[in-house]
Image: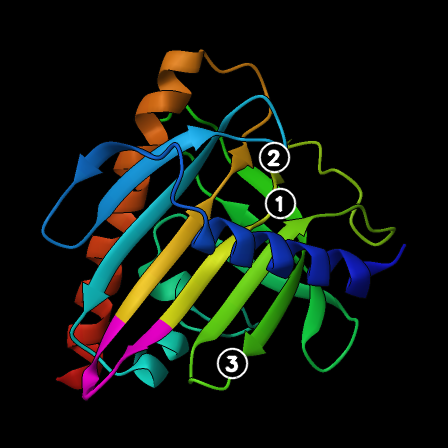
């Protein structure tokens, strides 16, 4: 399987989503984030866009969110129970497995996701983490977990010009949770979950600065 090629394609799609203003409909707004959605072209679900400005440097934000083994995500992100690198494909791409705890008052049972993840830095200092689902021989489905599927998704950490302690975090989520969940549960879960992600990240950054 061309893991590197799939990772690059996911990054290209993220860049397309970032530049495409059409069809987004607002569904949730908090002090930290504005969330909007539109139908996904990848699967029979929704693509979510989340945008918020964080009072921290891009490097600090990146340290909190970057998808690496032993990173801080498992400490502050309530949706990440475990994160492991299955295969390093290149200096910038790796196949990873993420397990998530039960959620939404346990209506959503624990899940696992196997993705190829690409990390990339742009000339303007923007950092991108992009991912999409893959199969891997070292990661057969676990009998005690539901296998979910991420379609091209990830985060842009964008510096705010002239403001080194501010970062725009632009995120895209499009996930098939798998299993047999009512659509109403899925539609309620994601906007609330994304808002919680930004809220918990804001708290983690404050702890980092303390």
Look at the numbered disc 1 and give the secondary structure of its residue: strand
Q: Cα distance, mark 2 to mark 3?
A: 30 Å
Asked whether the residues under the numbered discs 1 and 2 touch, taking CB atoms below 8 Å apart as contact, a structural biologist would say: yes
Q: Is residue 17 above or below residue 163?
A: above
Identify the main secondary structure in magenta.
Answer: strand
Q: Which residue is mark 3?
A: 122
Q: Which residue is mark 1?
A: 113
Give whichever of discs 1 and 2 has the lower sequence position: 1
- Answer with left or right where residue 178 lies relative to residue 101: right
Magenta region: 158-167
Q: Is residue 78 above or below residue 28?
A: below
Q: Which residue is mark 2?
A: 148
- Circle 2 packing at 10 Å, graded few (<14), some (14-19), many (20+), is many
Q: Cα distance, mark 1 to mark 3?
A: 27 Å
Residue at 46 percent across and 76 percent down: it is 127
Query: Which of these two is toward me, 23 or 187?
Result: 23
- Answer with left or right where residue 149 lies relative to residue 29: right
Mark toward the viewer: 2 or 3? 3
């Amino acid at each position: 399987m061309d893991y590197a090629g799939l990772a690059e394609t996911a990054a290209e799609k993220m860049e397309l989503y970032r530049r495409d203003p059409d069809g987004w409909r607002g569904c949730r707004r908090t002090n930290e984030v504005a969330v909007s959605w539109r139908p996904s072209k990848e699967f029979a679900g929704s693509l979510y866009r989340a945008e918020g400005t964080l009072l921290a440097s891009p490097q600090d934000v990146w340290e909190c969110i970057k998808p690496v083994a032993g990173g801080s995500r498992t400490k502050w992100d309530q949706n990440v129970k475990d994160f492991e690198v299955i295969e390093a494909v290149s200096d910038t791409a790796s196949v990873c497995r993420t397990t998530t705890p039960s959620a939404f008052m346990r209506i959503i049972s624990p899940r696992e996701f196997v993705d190829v993840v690409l990390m990339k830095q742009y000339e303007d200092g923007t950092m991108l983490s992009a991912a999409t689902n893959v199969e891997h021989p070292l990661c057969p489905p676990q009998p005690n977990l539901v296998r979910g599927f991420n379609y091209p998704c990830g985060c842009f950490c964008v510096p705010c010009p002239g403001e080194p302690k501010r970062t725009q975090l632009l995120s895209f989520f499009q996930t098939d949770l798998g299993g047999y969940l009512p659509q109403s549960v899925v539609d309620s879960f994601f906007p609330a979950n994304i808002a919680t992600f930004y809220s918990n990240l804001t708290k983690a950054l404050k702890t980092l600065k303390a």
